Amino acid sequence: MPHREFNINEVADYLHVSKKSVKDLVNQGEIPFERKGGRLVFRRKDLDSWASQRILGLSEDKLTDYHKATSIKSHDLSTTHNIMPELIRKEYIAPDMSSKTKSSIIRDMVALADHTGLLNDPEGLRTSIEEREQMCSTALDGGMAVLHPHTQDPYMSEDSFVIMGKTVQPIPFGSPDGRTTDIFFLLCSQSDRIHLHVLARICMMCHHTDLLLNLREAGDAESMHKAIIAAEDEVIDSL
C-alpha cells in the first residue's frame, strides 16, 4: 500500500519513535507532511524515501541507537502479566541432556538456543555466557542455574526468549550451597529491563513454588512446559 496516508500516531509507530519526536520533526520542517483540514497527513511513499535517506545520514552512534530501538520487541513487563508463554515453547526444552561438565552444558544450551531460529550470533552468545560465568556462577541453591550473557545485546537475537534443559546426571556448576545442578535455564534478552524482569520471575517460580520438583518428575518437554506455565500462574496469583 505505497499510497497509504498516516496520521501522527501511526507515523510514530511506523518509525519506532515517540509522538513528540514526530512533532519536533514537523516543527523543524525535517519530515515530509501535508496539512488537510487542520490535521497532519504523512504519505507512506514520501515517508519511506525520507526515512531511508535519514538512516543513511545518521552518525554511527545515532544509527546504533536507532537500530536498538527498532530491534527490541516489546513485552508487557507488569507484575500481573504472564510473560513465560511468550518466551518459552516446549520445543525450547531439552528433558534429558547428556552434558557432564560446565563447558559442555554451556555449549549444549547455546546449541538448543540456536535451534529456536531466533539466535543471530551463537558463537557470540557462548562467549558472553562464559564471560559471565567467569565473573560469578549463575548457579543457585536448589540445583538450578539461570545462564545468561554478560551483556544484553538487541543484535544477538530476533526476540527475547528462554530455553530450559535438564541433565540426566547433576553436574558441578558452582552452586552457593556446594551441591550439583541439573536444572538449567538460559535467558536471551534484548534489553537489561527485560532481562531483570524475567530473571526475577524465574527465580520466584523456582523458589516459591514446586517448579523444580515438578520439572524433575516430568518425563517430557510438554510436561515441563506445562509445569513452567503453572508455576508462573501460581506466582502471579500470590502477588
Image (cartoon, rainbow, N blue to C red):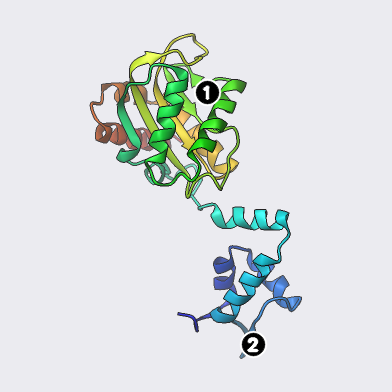
Residue 229 percent location from the top left of the image: 34, 37
Whether pointer 2 and pointer 1 mark residues with C-beta atoms closer than 8 Å, the reply is no
| Amino acid at pointer 1 | Thr
**Image vertical order of residue 40 relative to residue 25, above or below:** below
> Foreground: 176 or 79?
176
| Amino acid at pointer 2 | Arg
**Image vertical order of residue 38 relative to residue 63, above or below:** below
Give the SS element for disc 2. strand
Quadrant in which the N terminus appears: bottom left
Q: Which residue is mark 1?
A: 138
The residues tagged by marks 2 and 1 sit, at their Cα atoms, a distance apart of: 56 Å
**Image vertical order of residue 34 relative to residue 179, above or below:** below
Residue 69 percent location from the top left of the image: 60, 55
Find residue 189 and name its label. none
Which residue is found at the position 66% from the left and 53% from the top? 64
Residue 211 percent location from the top left of the image: 35, 26
Q: Which residue is mark 2?
A: 35
> Foreground: 170 or 205?
170
Q: Nearer the viewer, mark 2 or mark 1?
A: 1
Q: Let me know if residue 204 appears in the view.
A: no
> Foreground: 157 or 4?
157
Q: Which corner quadrant of the image does residue 184 belong to?
A: top left
